[in-house]
Image (cartoon, grey):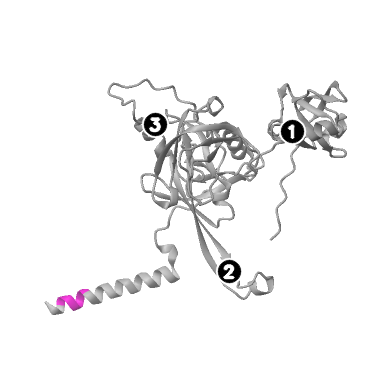
Amino acid sequence: MLRLWLLFSQAVTICVAALFVISTFRPEWLPQRAAAPSNAPPVTVLQQVAAQPQPAAGTRPDSYYDAVKRAAPSVVSVFTAKEVRQPPFNDPLFRRFFGTERATGLGSGVIVSASGYILTNNHVVEAADEIEVALTDGSRLLAQVVGADPETDLAVLRVKADKLPAISFGASETLRVGDIVLAIGNPLGVGQTVTAGIVSAVDRSGLGINVFENFIQTDAAINQGNSGGALIDVRGNLVGINTAIVSQSGGSIGIGFAIPASTTKVVLEQIVRTGTVARGWIGVEMQDVTAATAASFKLTGASGALISGVLRNGPADKAGVKPGDLLVSVEGKPVNQAQGVLNVVSGLSPGSNAKLALKRQGQDLELTVTVGKRPKPQVRAE
């Protein structure tokens, strides 16, 4: 018996040694994880809004089980890793002499196409060297960034898989204050979690979170790790991508913000088609009309946004727009504040013509501007 045990121990030792040698010098002989896809052709990524289901016999009116069951498989956990240098002093001379550390991150994402496209927040995957997503069935897949839009804090990932459970898009523009919504994500890494609340406000802007802001505000609990996850309606349709909270402690206090599904659709379609997002631009600086600015520019009884600056030789300058003009509407869409102008103009196609309704020295004026392409945001040097 002792001899058999010695033979077994020697055999195990030899196998472990052989595995170590192969993994060190010939790792390609071992099974590999699925590699991240590259140069994938564009595909149809958007799901049609599903018909509203009729209450089934036995459905409980006090439960959102059916909505969660429908949407939850489309929400994934996003794990990131990147190398960072940690010198004792913030001096370039010291950086080369010290090693790097592996920093990890956690977020959530939403499957928007059965062919492997996933929406998440840009800040979740920004500068990551490796991205891995975990599906609700327990499988893990490597992902690559198809494109990102820092100005809305959105990014599109793709994994090498098909027949994935894609979510259905809802009509976020019809949301009302008081409507019930559910947030799904992986807060603090505890696993997929569902929280419920109401729409506290719509079209929130001026928060300084993103360049383009028209947030859905909700009191559904959103915590670290929920970023990039789904905000759904009571039928299980996607109405927003959870992105930020206001908190002094770092935990949820009932003030969370989601990017509307209508905005994510536009960004998603452009990134999948071209890898980037092109927005309209007319080359003006705007500011809200206050009592002080109204008195300074002699504005009486008028609503709109004040044009405080015009870029020389920019689209607005060429069209005849002048500082001090009051912009009332763009392509017939009324504007009442500077953020509203930014959102409307950015939605115009570069190269198209747009009509601006203005007031100048109390007189109504209409000008046509040829919309330019919004310059890319400047990247801050490290």
The quadrant of the rendering that contains the N terminus is bottom left
Which of the two residues, 313 or 338, is positioned nearer the viewer here? 338
As drawn, 124 above or below 343: below
Magenta segment, which residues? 4-8
Which of the two residues, 233 or 16, is positioned nearer the viewer here? 233
Q: Which amino acid does label 2 sit on?
A: Gln
What is the spatial separation of the Cα atoms under label 1 and label 2, in whole angstroms? 43 Å
Q: Which amino acid does label 1 sit on?
A: Pro
What is the spatial separation of the Cα atoms under label 1 and label 3, in whole angstroms? 39 Å
Give the residue at mark 2: 86
Please identify the quarter of the rendering in which residue 320 is found: top right
Residue shown at the point (77%, 32%) measured from the top left: 291
Of pointers 2 and 3, the one earlier in the residue sequence: 3
Helix, strand or loop at disc 2?
Answer: loop
As drawn, 9 above or below 179: below
Give the residue at mark 3: 67
Q: Where does residue 152 sit, x and y in percent of width and height?
A: 62, 41
Q: Which amino acid does label 3 sit on?
A: Ala
Q: Where does residue 95 sit, x and y in percent of width and height?
A: 64, 71
Residue shown at the point (57%, 33%) measured from the top left: 265
Give the residue at mark 1: 350
